[in-house]
């Protein structure tokens, strides 16, 4: 395989890893926020 192809593949794999990490963090943050919203809703329900 030509060196430029190998280099590009390596770069793409590195970028894919970065994006995967970002997506994982976003998913975790979203789950945390969902739990917070649910807790607030439950609190409001008991107060009303």
Image (cartoon, rainbow, N blue to C red):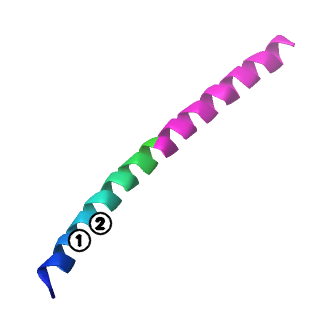
- Residue carrying label 2: 12
10 to the left or right of 42: left
Q: In the rendered view, tell whether residue 35 sits above or below residue 17.
A: above
Is residue 28 within the magenta segment? Answer: yes
x, y (%) of residue 9? Answer: 24, 73
Residue closest to the eye, 2 or 32 = 2
**Point 24% across, 64% down: residue:** 11
The numbered dot on residue 38 is: none
In the image, residue 14 sits, relative to residue 37, either above or below, namely: below
Going by the picture, which residue comes out furthest to the left? 3
Confirm or deny contact between disc 1 and disc 2 (CB under 8 A): yes
Cα distance in 3D space between marks 1 and 2: 6 Å
Q: Residues within 10 Å of mark 2 (few under 14, many from 20)?
A: few
> What main secondary structure does the magenta stretch of the protein show?
helix
Residue sitting farthest toward the right: 48
Q: Which residue is mark 1?
A: 8
């Amino acid at each position: 395989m030509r060196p430029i192809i190998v280099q590009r593949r390596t770069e793409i794999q590195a970028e894919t890893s970065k994006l995967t990490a970002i997506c994982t963090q976003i998913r975790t943050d979203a789950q945390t926020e969902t739990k917070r919203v649910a807790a607030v809703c439950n609190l409001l329900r008991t107060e009303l």
